[in-house]
Image (spheres, grey):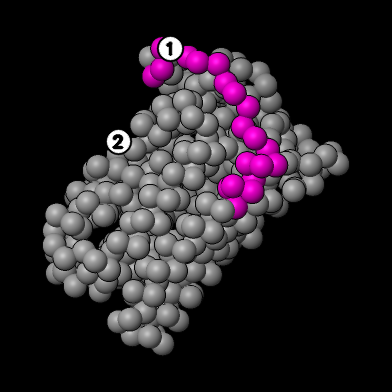
Amino acid sequence: MIITSTGGRVAGARPFLVGMFADALGSGLYVPLTLLFIHQVTGLPLTTVGLGVTAAAVVGLAANPAAGALIDRFGARRVLMATYLLRAAGFAAYPFVDGFAALVAVAAVVATGDRAYYPASGSYVAVLARGADRDKLYTLMATARNVAFGLGGLLSAGAVSLAGGAGFTLIAALNAASFLVATGCLVVSGRRAPAPATPREPRGYRAVFADRPFVALVAAEQAFTLAHMILPVALPVYAVTVLGAPVWLTGVLYTLNTVLVAAGQLAVRRRQRAARRTHAMALAGAILVAACALYAATALLPPGAPRAGGLLVATLVLTLGELMHTTPSWALAAATAPTALRGRYLAIHQQTWAVAAVVAPGGYAALLDAEPSLLWIALAALLVPACLALLRLARRLPPDAVAAPGT
């Protein structure tokens, strides 16, 4: 169990977090090498793998809304367990894939589990804890996942370097096992904290979209999720092709971001305890706007060390904005949702990440190709109205959802 700041206990939280760690550790083994991993395990050409993964991702887009309905019907813990079992089956099946159709089928199973995981995990945290304890549990979840993901990346490199091609098959087996471990942890968590029954809501998604303040919150969240795509999608292209930075620098910046996000979650959360969640998110947005300005300004610096330093500073500011956004965003969405529709609410909230994953690669590439500064102007133009909307929403969303979480 997790001891809360008020001296109580959040029943079932410890096995849940252990499962989160196991899941992220396994995922960290393959995510940095996704296309290469599938290519090596299946023996299919990289172009075929790329097409298959893209097709599976499109299928996965439907998983968020479907998961939301299932969460409201069967409970968050059961759906979260199903996401683990789906991905365990998918990774266990990868070594047996022998063609494009089989690849799409297996990758779609994995993608469905990946997309459904986020509303399910967020909903289960909302079942386990409330108020400040909920914010803290979201923070601990983010910390555990980032630490485990980083360790998984290191283990992945070791497995491949020591075992060669067989290392990729080992990664598939270990990742499948990690999801089974996470499932077992949820079994234990459920025994300690059984999910309460929730009233039926016949209107389903109609009620979610009729909640105009929540829809406005989701629209604002879309700007933030697009900003989160800067580091993995935009920065490598911008740094290397526009600024002429060495490729290795982008890897260093990505690693630095990962380490700081893992190490800084709890410290940032302590600083935000007295801030209303809407206002904490708005401040995070202002910092992300500053990061966009710094990335744009880096192009004005002389090549070499000055530009590398500019990229470093901009990435540190971006990381701070990401840290300040994550916990208030999750907690605000969960607290805004009626209990009977929490799964659907969080599914729509999390769909912003799926949209960003689809839009960012092509959209960012097009803007950078046309005029690099347009990317930073476009992101700032989305974030500024989002910040202002959040300040206005402080008066329209439920007061207990907006209120500062306290200790």
Figure check: 65 above or below 399: below
Q: In which quarter of the image is residue 216?
A: top left
Q: What residue type is labelled 2?
A: Ala
Horizontal side, residue 351 vs residue 319: left or right: left
Q: Which of marks 2 and 1 is nearer the N terminus?
A: 2
Q: Which mark is residue 62?
A: 2
Figure check: 259 above or below 279: below
Per the image, is 80 magenta? no
Per the image, is 190 magenta? yes
Q: In which quarter of the image is residue 127?
A: top right
Q: Do the residues labelled 2 and 1 touch (CB within 8 Å)?
A: no
Residue 347 rendering spot, x and y as whole percentages: 43, 32
Q: Which one is in front, 301 or 157?
A: 157
Q: Residue at horizontal 41%, vertical 41%?
A: 116
Name the secondary structure under disc 1. Answer: loop
Residue 240 rendering spot, x and y as whole percentages: 30, 68
Q: Can residue 220 be seen in this view?
A: no
Residue 165 rendering spot, x and y as whole percentages: 30, 82
Task: For marks 2 and 1, give the one nearer the viewer.
Answer: 1
The region drawn magenta spans: 185-205
Q: Which amino acid does label 1 sit on?
A: Pro
Judge the density around disc 1: few (<14), some (14-19), many (≥20) Cα neighbours within 10 Å: few
Q: Which one is in front, 164 or 31?
A: 164
- Location of mark 1 (residue): 202
Where is the C terminus found, in terms of image quarters?
top right
Name the secondary structure under disc 2. Answer: loop
Q: Can residue 198 be seen in this view?
A: yes
Q: Residue at horizontal 56%, vertical 53%?
A: 184
Q: Residue at horizontal 41%, vertical 12%?
A: 203
Q: Residue at horizontal 69%, vertical 51%?
A: 14
Horizontal side, residue 360 vs residue 314: left or right: left
Horizontal side, residue 156 vs residue 148: left or right: left
